Image (tube, helix red, strand yellow):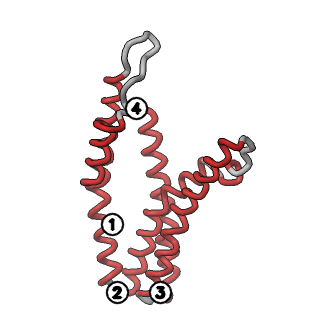
Amino acid sequence: MLATLLYYLLVLMVGRRWSGGTLDDGTSADLLGLRSVAIMTALWLTGSLVAGPVLGLLGHIVRVGRASTSALAAGALCGLLAGEGWQALVLAPPWQLLTVTDPHHAEFFRGVVVGQLVKIVLPIVVLAWLATAHRLWRSWPMLFTAAISSGALSAALWHALYAAANSV
């Protein structure tokens, strides 16, 4: 929550991405920019207030739960954390981004592809480590099912979030 507040405070005070625009009629778009910053701050604060305790609880369950419960929690964590990467991958498949021929855009798009893959691969690597460290491989069907289902749910939620943010 503190990171969210600090980020939007920096956007407001230092970045000033919200200022300087003009509307079609020539008037300042600053109020619309400030409105957008306020809405997104409220949205992300609400998200952090909900997601923080949920992720913390799942992490606690991985540490102290029985093998089957820990496997479900670890799979759910993996899916929740990788969901944004999966959603981005569906919207902008890497094979399309890597075919950009303009050298100035190609470097940027390659960076986007690497970022998308890190969002997906890193939670999977952590899941494999957790499964090994907590000896959850015997419960791999539950681990896999939880990761897939929570990943799909997370991707759908990220899609809805981006759609809502773009409609504001």
**Depth order, front residue of 8/125:** 8
Asked if 58 appears above or below 106 in the picture, the reply is: below
Q: Which comes sooner in the sequence, label 4 or label 1?
A: 1
Image mark for residue 64? none
Residue occupied by mark 4 = 168
Q: Is residue 68 left or right of residue 10?
A: right
Separation of disc 3 and disc 2 at Cα?
Answer: 15 Å
In space, the residues marked 3 and 1 are separated at their CA atoms by 20 Å
* Residue denoted by label 3: 132
Please, what secondary structure does the residue beneath circle 2 have?
loop
Helix, strand, or loop for circle 3? Answer: helix
Q: Nearer the viewer, mark 3 or mark 2?
A: 3
Mark 1: few/some/many CA within 10 Å (<14, 14-19, 20+): some
State the residue position of label 2.
Answer: 66
The residue beneath circle 1 is: 55
Q: Which SS class for mark 4? A: loop
